[in-house]
Amino acid sequence: MTAYSFPSDFEWGTATASYQVEGAVHEDSRSDCIWDVFCREPGKVYMGADGGVACDQYHRYEEDIALIASLGFKAYRFSIAWPRVIPDGTGTVNEAGLDYYKRLCDCIHSHGMKAMATIYHWDLPAVLQENGGWACRGIVDVFTSYAEACFRGLGDKVDSWITINEPFCIAYLGYYEGEHAPGHRDLQEAIAAIHHLNLAHGRTVKLYRSMSLTAPIGITWNLFVPRPFDNTPESKKAVEYAIAVKSRVFTDPVLKGSYPELVKELGFRFPVEKGDMEDISQPIDFIGINYYSEDAVTYSEDELFRYKVCPDWHPVSDMGWPVVPDGLARLLRWISNESGNLPLYITENGAAEPDVVSPDGRVHDADRIDYLRKHFKAVSRVIAEGVNLKGYYIWSFIDNFEWAKGYSKRFGIVYCDYATLERIPKDSAYFVKDVIGGLCDWT
């Protein structure tokens, strides 16, 4: 393989998540999720936005899948909405909700693409949060039952499975920082949620193996592997603290069967019971990696976790996140080493930019093209080094509900006019199409 190229069987895909794109929140017996509730709380979401309509993909999926295929993608990553499949959180399966995902998978396959399904991408049925949500151990068995319903209903239609998307965001942003649903600010709840998310993942993989299903199954992490602010021992130590708190609390239990010692030093006490670590460390087939940015950190005794983020010289995206393509290469090398070179997929990578429709009817998103080009080059380098990277899913297929930011940030390579719901491929969509097809010198 030459420099800045990709293997012929490289899996190019694009991704979305149920609450961000589907809409139709009151149709076919779907119940409220925690984000429906969170959006109704004043001041929690920009401009009081919600996912009630979003991109209306629930009704427009055929149009969207045809567009994705026309852009040359080989796979589509979507997530399954728990409140559609089991509206009460536990108990009776809602066949109408499950049927939607059957139709979606059939449509994906009819266009010659693979279906990658994420079982949980943050839309916990609201009724389960009333019982403590991820902070309570009972959620583990409830989640496993939900996953079983997905496996039984879609096991012959899904080409690869992701158990949970970004447990970091679920635990820390949802239960400690309060930025995401359910909006709590309690470190002990977050620590409990970390363990229950890890355990739910492991129990789900164990169940999956017992059902003799054969499609690959893994998990998606948004890992934080910052670089030191300078060459001092203090900054290098800060990196270790940051990795332990933000990454190893998820990766070590799955890959090594234990929690990192450094977080115990910080007072983390996980509610581990007999057999938990064995269940969590079930072998997985691949790791999904979501990457957008990288920070520089230094040591600080004043910080709870002993590190603080430092000023950065890189340009930033519309989210204010530094654009650091080499950070993706560093992260891929790190997780490859940690996992014994397990197959990796970039399950999300992209940039929010202040996109507008020009008088010519086009969206000229040159900054996003530059972002993607530089990240493609970083990825190509690590593949050449021997990192076992199998695919790359662009985030996102279409502009959508960006959680607490509402509709103020656009990540899509396809523009969504939220008033008319018209889809307009941006210049970046055509750029990616040419890269996939080998039709341009993108380097």
Image: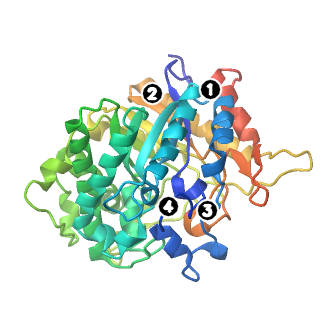
Q: Where does label 2 land, which residue?
A: 383
Q: Where does label 3 land, which residue?
A: 320
Crowding around mark 3 (Cα neighbors within 10 Å: few <14, some 14 to 19, many 20+) is few
| Drawn side of residue 224 relative to residue 411, left or right | left
Q: Position of residue 142 (x, y in %)?
A: 27, 60
Judge by depth and name the residue closer to the eye, 247 or 100.
100
* C-beta proximity under 8 Å, tags 3 and 4: no
**Looking at the image, is mark 3 or mark 2 earlier in the sequence?**
3
Query: Which of the labelled discs sits on residue 91, or is there none?
Result: none
User: Which amino acid is tagged 4?
Assistant: Ser
**Looking at the image, is mark 4 or mark 1 earlier in the sequence?**
4
Secondary element at image label 1:
helix
Taking the spot 74% from the left edge, 59% from the top edge, the residue there is 418
Judge by depth and name the residue closer to the eye, 284 or 246.
284
Label 2, label 4: how far apart the Cα atoms are: 45 Å
Tell me if residue 153 comes above or below residue 11 in the rendering.
Answer: below
Secondary element at image label 3:
loop
Q: Position of residue 101 (x, y in %)?
A: 49, 44
Q: Where does label 4 land, which residue?
A: 29
Of discs 1 and 3, which sits in the foreground? 1
Residue 377 shows in this picture: no
